[in-house]
Image (cartoon, rainbow, N blue to C red):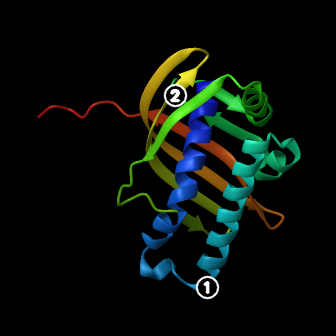
Amino acid sequence: MKEFILLISLSFCLQKSFAQLHEMQSPAFKDSQYVKEFTAIKSTWNNWQNAVQHKDKSLYNKCVAPEYIHTNPGGEVTTRDKEFSDMISGVQLFSKIELIPLEYDKIRIYNGSTDIIPAQYKVSGNDHGQEFVMQTRALITMVKTNGAWQFVAWQATGVGKPFQK
């Protein structure tokens, strides 16, 4: 269930930060094709967020590929169907979600058909009655299939305290 918390958390964080991530791209990527693809990726994010908020399985399945795989910071792996099932259970609550912008968190589009989105965020809430606060790095992969962007992989890693020097 924590994997869903992280997924939802990042959704809300990235929703607010898409403009920022777009602006962080190098000038070489700000051509019309990039803007077109970026807009389509943002639309998929918005649709996905709406699907999650309204528990709309049809819309969710349009945004998340059948072969989707998610690995949470605990190393647990989930699939599209498992994640949707967790989503509609209603056992997770979020109290705070904070994006931690880093200069190298840029949406990267490759060959117009694959994008990689790195992000870092701090989230707190309640999962199955247990309070939590965690900082997480995520690496999200989307592919363009039949003209539409879909999530195919989401890897989340807990961020520990930095090494002492």
Residue 161: horizontal and vertical position, in percent?
A: 27, 31
**Please, which residue is most extreme toward the bottom here?**
32
Residue 76: horizontal and vertical position, in percent?
A: 60, 24
* Mark 2 nearby-residue class (10 Å; few <14, some 14–19, many ≥20): some
SS at mark 1? helix
Query: Answer yes or no: do the residues labelled 2 and 1 have beta carbons within 8 Å?
Result: no
The answer to which quarter of the image holds residue 79 is top right
Residue toward you, 163 or 100: 100
Answer with left or right where residue 50 lies relative to residue 14: right
Residue 31: horizontal and vertical position, in percent?
A: 56, 84
SS at mark 2? strand
The answer to which quarter of the image holds residue 44 is bottom right
Residue 125 — which label? 2
What amino acid is found at the position of numbered circle 1 in the picture?
A: Ser
Residue 103 sits above or below residue 124 on the image: below
Q: Nearer the viewer, mark 2 or mark 1?
A: 2
Question: On the rendered image, what quadrant is the N terminus found in?
Answer: top right
- Which residue was labeled with disc 1? 32
Answer whether residue 85 is visible to the viewer in this image.
yes
Answer with left or right where residue 92 lies relative to residue 27: right
What amino acid is found at the position of numbered circle 2 in the picture?
A: Gly
The number of numbered badges drawn on the structure is 2
Residue 133: horizontal and vertical position, in percent?
A: 43, 27
Residue at 49% x, 19% y is 131
* Mark 1 nearby-residue class (10 Å; few <14, some 14–19, many ≥20): few
Residue at 48% x, 37% y is 96
Residue 122 sits above or below residue 20 on the image: above
**Please, which residue is most extreme toward the top here?**
129
Answer with left or right where residue 57 lies relative to residue 52: right
Residue 94 — which label? none
Residue toward you, 105 or 46: 46
